[in-house]
Image (spheres, grey):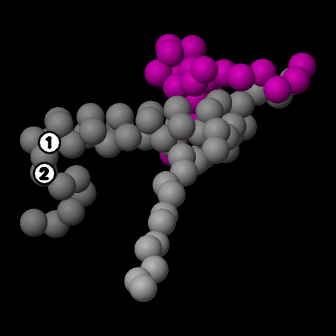
Amino acid sequence: MAQRSTTTIQAPAPALEKVPTAARRAAISVSQAYREIKAGRLGPLVKLGARSSAVPAESVDAWIAARIAEATNKNGGEKIGGAA
């Protein structure tokens, strides 16, 4: 008898990233990250304590993907920064 392989695809667990870590991953300054949060393009800001905040990792991923899509659309789908 042949064995049937069953694989289950699980969604990644929700995660939070401190703002400086999210800024580093997005290649922006911490100040710019807070400006993006205030403008509603990154975030929401989650308070972890009196002096600690974080943003959902999936919102950082979405922000990065949006910047890539924006850059791709501006260049008509051409590669950015590559030699022809």
Label ID, residue 43? none
Q: Is residue 14 above or below residue 78?
A: above
In the rendered image, residue 32, in percent from the top left (x then y), is placed at 55, 28
**Amino acid type shown at disc 1:** Asn
Residue 40 covered by magenta stretch: yes
Kindly identify the residue that appears in the image at 66 percent across and 21 percent down.
45
Residue furthest to the front:
1
The residue pinned by badge 1 equals 75
Q: Is residue 69 above or below residue 9?
A: above
Q: CA distance from mark 2 to mark 1?
A: 5 Å
Q: Quadrant of the C terminus?
A: bottom left
Q: Residues at badges 2 and 1 in contact (C-beta under 8 Å)?
A: yes
Task: Give, as a single range, the part of the protein colored magenta.
Answer: 27-50
The residue pinned by badge 2 equals 78
Residue 32, visible in the rendered structure: no
Kindly identify the residue that appears in the image at 48 percent across and 64 percent down.
7
- Tag 2 secondary structure: loop
- Tag 1 secondary structure: loop
Q: Is residue 46 left or right of residue 50?
A: left
Residue 51 covered by magenta stretch: no
- Of 43 and 4, nearer the camera is 4
